[in-house]
Amino acid sequence: MNQQLAAAMAAEEAAIYAYGILGVHLVAPAQVAEARAAETAHRNRRDYLLGQIDQPPAAAAGYDLPFPVADPVSAVRLAVHVEDGVAQSWRPVLGASQGAARAAALSALTDAAVRATRWRRIAALSPVTMPYPGKAA
């Protein structure tokens, strides 16, 4: 299960990085608050994972963004992309865990899916929700 947890940790680290980038491009107070809350949630998940992995991998020094982020529209698109990726990273943990660890993985996947839905609603994307959160498209 360490491999699945390491992948989830990498996604959480990437999300923290992405929110640092996209947050500076948001101007609406509600979006800024949403981004701050999301970054805090990802930091908390990362900290949780630090206690679960025997030898946590070092975080990358930087990450390649999937597209340029230069305005609020692209920032919100990145938030959707990030949350979908985080949900996808937690899905394999469900099959490899049980008990409290499985509940934590389900909570992480659900939280990321809910955040992605919020960002899709902000961006007026359709559909707003995914039928199987965490499943690669």
Image (tube, grey):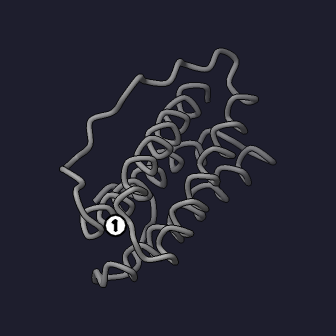
Q: Residue at x 69, y 29 (%)?
A: 50
Q: Amino acid at mark 1?
A: Val
Alpha-carbon neighbours of circle 1 within 10 Å: few (<14), some, or many (≥20)? many
Q: Residue at x 41, y 72 (%)?
A: 119
Residue 93, relative to residue 1: is it above or below?
Answer: below
In percent of width and height, residue 114 lies at 53, 71
Residue 116, relative to residue 134: is it above or below?
Answer: below
In percent of width and height, residue 101 lies at 74, 44
* Residue situated furthest top in the rendering: 55
Q: Nearer the viewer, residue 96 or 38?
A: 38
Classify the position of the N terminus by image quarter. top right
Q: Nearer the viewer, residue 108 or 136?
A: 108
Residue 106, relative to residue 28: is it above or below?
Answer: above
- Per the image, the residue denoted by label 1 is 76
Classify mark 1: helix, strand or loop.
Answer: helix
* Residue situated furthest right in the rendering: 100
Residue 28 placement, left or right of 38: left
Q: Residue at x 53, y 26 (%)?
A: 3
In percent of width and height, residue 17 lies at 44, 41
In percent of width and height, residue 123 lies at 32, 78
Give residue 131's quadrant in the image: bottom left
Give residue 36's quadrant in the image: bottom right
Residue 121, relative to residue 79: is it above or below?
Answer: below
Give residue 136's quadrant in the image: bottom left
Q: Residue at x 52, y 78 (%)?
A: 30
Classify the position of the C terminus by image quarter. bottom left
